[in-house]
Every structure is written in C-alpha cells, then in structure tokens.
Amino acid sequence: MISFFIKRLLLLIPVFLAVSMVIFMIVHLVPGDPIDNLVQINSTPEQKAALAAKYGLDKPLYQQYAIWLGKALSGDLGDAIILRRPVVDLIALNLPHSLALGALALAFSTVVGIGAGALAAIYKDSLIDRTTMTLILLGSTVPGFWLGLLLIMLFAVQLGWFPVSGARSWDALVLPVLTVGLGGVALVARVTRVAMMETARKDFVMMLHAKGVPPWQIELRHVLRHALLPVVTILSLRIGWILGGAVTVEFVFARPGLGSLLITSLNQRDYPVVQGSLLMLAIAVMLGTLLGDVVQAAMDPRVRERIK
Amino acid sequence: MAALDPIRKAIRSPRGAGSAAVLVLVVACAVFAPLLAPYAYDIQNLPGANTEPGWAHWMGTDEFGRDLFSRIVYGARTSLTVAISAISISVAAGLTLGAMAGYFGGPFDRAVTAVVDLTWSFPEILIALILIAIIGPGLESTMVAISIAYLAQFTRLTRAQIMALKNETYVEATANLGAGHFHIIFRHLLPNALTPVIVAGMLATGDAIILEATLGFFGLGAQPPTPSWGAMMSSGTAQIFIAPWIIIFPGLAIALTVIAINLFGDALIEALDIRNRLRSS
C-alpha cells in the first residue's frame, strides 16, 4: 500500500512539471513584454531593466522556468500588481476557504449521493426512484452558478435563513456547499443506483435470498458494499471536477477562495496572481486525484496490482 | 436517407420527441432571432429599467431597460454558435488525433495518450481558464478554450474505437489489396468509428453551452452589449433583490436547452444501441 502511494506520487511529478510549464508560459504567451505583465505599468526603463534582472527575464526561457519553479517551490510566487502584496500571502488567505468548501462539498456529494442512489435502487421504479432520477438529471444539467443564484434568491433574499454572500460565519457555507455538492450528488447517485441494480442480479445475492436473509440486510450489507467500488472509482476520477465546481460557486457567492482570486485576477490581468492561483488549483486537483486513487487502492487490491 | 433512421427512431419515444421539439425551438430562436425578438437587443431605456414581466415585456427588462426576451432570443445565437463551432472543431481534431494515435501506435500514440491523460484529470473549467489567461477574454477565446478543453475526450474515444476496429479481417483484407494507411483510416476505419464520437460530441455541446455561460458569467466570455445567457445573469446579480427575473429567465433558457440536448442524446444512444461503445473509452 505504501509502495503504491509512493509510486502514484512519483507519477505526479511529470504531470506537475508539464502543468507548471504551461502556467509559467502564460506571461510569455500573452501579448506584450513579459515584464509589463509582471509589474505595474508606468515603470521607468531603469526600473524595468532592474526588474528584468530580478525576475531573470534576461536569461534563456528554460533557465527562467527553472528560476521561477525554484522560487515557487520555496514559496515565492512574486508580488500582486494590483494589491501589491506577495502572491503567497493572498493564497494563504484564500486557500482555507476553498479547502473547507471543497471538502464539505465532497463529503456532501458522497454521503447524500450514495444515500439517494441506494434508495432509488432499493425502491426501483417507485416514486422515490423517479424523483431521485429527475433530481439527478436536473443536478447534472443545471449550470452550477445559476443554481447558486436561485438558492440565494430563495434562502437568502426571500427567507433570510442564510447570508447572501461572504464568509463571515459558518452558515455562509451552507448554500455554497449545497450548490457545489448537488452536481456531485447527481453523479454519485447515478453510479450507486446502477451499480446496486447490477449487483442485485448476481448469483450470491440470489443465494442470500434463498437462505432467507432479510432483504434490508442483503441490500445494505451485501449489495451496497459491492456497489461502493464503482462509486469510489467515479469519485476518484471526478474529484477535480467537484473542485472545479467550487471555483465557479465561490465567485457567485462572493466568497474568498482560490477560484474567486483567479477570476478576479484574470479580469484585472494581474498575471502573478493568475499564475499563483492556477498553480495552487492544479496542485489541489492533482492531490485530490491522488487521494481518490489511494482510497480506491485501499478498497480494491486489483488497482494496486495495475500500477506495478 | 438511412443516416436519418436513428433520429427518426429517437423521435418516436416521448422523451426524444419532447426534447427534439425544444431543440428545434432553440435553433429557430437562434436562426430567426431578428424576426422573433420584439425589440432590438441593445436598445436601452433607462426609465423603464428593471420592469417586472408584463404585457409589454413578458420577461421584464434588465438594468438598462433592455427587453429581456429579445436578449434571450439573441442569446441563443451566441450560445449555440460558440458551443457548436467549438465542439465541431474539437470533434474534428479529436477524430484526426485519435485515429492517427490508435492506428499507428508507437511514439506518436504514446505522446498523444500522455497529453490526453494529463488533461483528463483536470476539470474543463480549469483548462478553459488557463487558456483564457493566455489568449485573453472574449467570445473567440471562449470558442478556442472550449474546443481545447474537450479535445481529450474525443481523442480518447476515437482512439479506443480505432484500436477495436483495426484488427478486423476487412481491414487486413483492404491492406492486403494494397490500400495505403490514409485510405484505410479515412475510408474504412473512421466511418465505422464515427457514430459514438458524434453522439458524444452532441452531448458535449450541452456541457459547452454551460461552460460558455460560466465564462460569460465571469466576464471572460462575450463582452457587452453582445447578448450571452451567462453574461446577462452576471449583470443581474447586482439586481438580485429587485429584479430576480434577469437571472431566472436566462438560466431557464440554459437549463432547458441543456436538458433537451441530454435527453435527445440519450434517446439517440438508445436508438443506435451504442451505450457500450461510448463506455469503452
């Protein structure tokens, strides 16, 4: 298991290098002098030359990348142009909010998704099944930001139960978690339902019925347990997708977070912040996928075999 | 025409018929926007700003007094143009890349697979945002960003199809008769691999509409006064307390369109009986 984890972690290194290279190249690919993209406008030529030397922009591209990556890894992502603070400080301020939202949304998707999917599978073709399936269809097709806005209108503006925006208190998290989570719930519920219905047709389940095991016990203890494997697989594949939902939803709820930071800086063309937040988001997605793989490998020895 | 048979079959189910009707309506809005919209999409009327839905403006007006219904009708044009062209480019590129990789194998296949696997675990929105960071905001950038964000999916699917087909006897026979690689790929393999990729492309068009709207909502897509469903909602957030219809109706337009695309795609998958082939990638 530990060797699986280490191998999986090592496999992330080339991915990280490739992604960081693309992110590094942003300032060189956008129109204009990279130095103008990295520091405030209206600098004098002397200031520019000094800054170019400081950022190593007078060196060949591959050396620049090495310098940038080295600095980034030691926690120096440059200074924000608009806010004039180290990018690392901005990330440190925003990261906890994104982590809380992402983790809670993931937990919500998993628990509610498995619950809803199991209910739909057990009461197949009943009203519960049809309602769940309709909600699943809506959850996977309605744009996340619109759902967020609708929830704000209903629960914040009309009913006044939760704050409209911001992150000053814990209850400001409820609507964002619901918004991000619902897409995940739809996905998890769909996979759970199908997997349970497929397992229910297997011979060992028929055997359990023949032995007179109570149906609820069969469903919960045997069928659901078998069905969890594809659920974990889909979660490990789609973990980044749930985190991606958080990017959108933070912006809708005007919550602090990496997503809001990224979109604000993109609109202001504050490239050091764009690079820093993209790098952090990419790392989050990679670690999320790693976590999913590890959980999957812990549950299924065949996954551990595959990587050898 | 034999190619239309699955569509006919799909329309026969109630789900397929209903969703096809909605899609025809949305496409009609996009094509005949100037005829259907009662007002111009960019005419401002500040005294009539934030008017509730009523007889004159049956979806109300926005914060500049522009008729919301007209803007939604024109918005269909923006959404569909961006989503359909982006996905078409993506499907065409994915078919080519996937077919080459699957057919030739070797280092080219390994390189393509490595890049596809790399982008696979990243959410489309993040890929699109990285690309927007490079090429800058705007409608054309949105199109490019969406087509690249979905490229991995179509490449992967095509590659899987070609891998499954290339060892068939008829391919071997054609090769023995002296057919060249490109003849085999374009005349024999791709036509047989096409159906699942096109259906996947159709389903992805729904996601692309949402992605376009999301980028528009962030202010990174369509720039004012171009009517885009996402951008309309974004300006509506400031009026959420007094004019919620500015947010409700464009969202409804997106949701209806995307649900219709998904249901019709599903009906088409049933009619063509290709669920397993779509899953195989």
Image (cartoon, coloured by chain):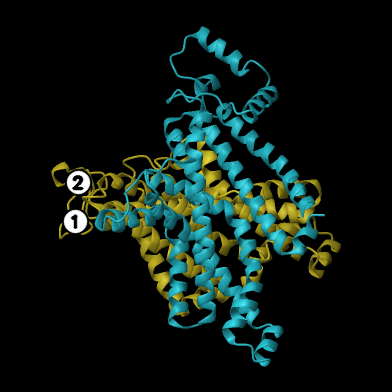
The front one of B45 and A39 is A39
Farthest top residue in view: A46
Q: Say which amino acid is labelled 1.
A: His
In the rendered picture, chain B carries what hue? Answer: yellow
The front one of B6 and B148 is B148
Disc 2, SS: loop
Label 2: chain? B
**Where is residue A74, by image quadrant?**
top right
Q: Quadrant of the C terminus of chain A?
A: bottom right
**Where is residue A77, by image quadrant?**
top right
Circle 1 is placed at which residue position? B57
Examine the rendered structure and indicate whether residue A95 appears above or below residue A34: below
In the picture, the disc for residue A181 is none
The front one of B220 and B12 is B220
The front one of B108 and A68 is A68
**Lower position in the chain sequence, tag 1 or tag 2:** 1
Residue A222: horizontal and vertical position, in percent? 65, 78
Distance Cα–Cα, label 1 vs label 2: 10 Å
Q: Quadrant of the N terminus of chain A?
A: bottom right
Which chain is displayed in cyan in the rendered image? A
Residue A63: horizontal and vertical position, in percent? 70, 22
In the picture, the disc for residue B65 is 2
Residue at image location 46% in from the left, 74% down from the top = B16
Q: From this viewpoint, is residue B135 visible?
A: no
Label 1: chain? B
Residue A286: horizontal and vertical position, in percent? 63, 46
Examine the rendered structure and indicate whether residue A278 appears above or below residue B275: above
Q: Residues within 10 Å of mark 1 (few under 14, many from 20)?
A: some
Q: Say which amino acid is labelled 2.
A: Gly
Q: Quick check: B85 left or right of A239? A: left
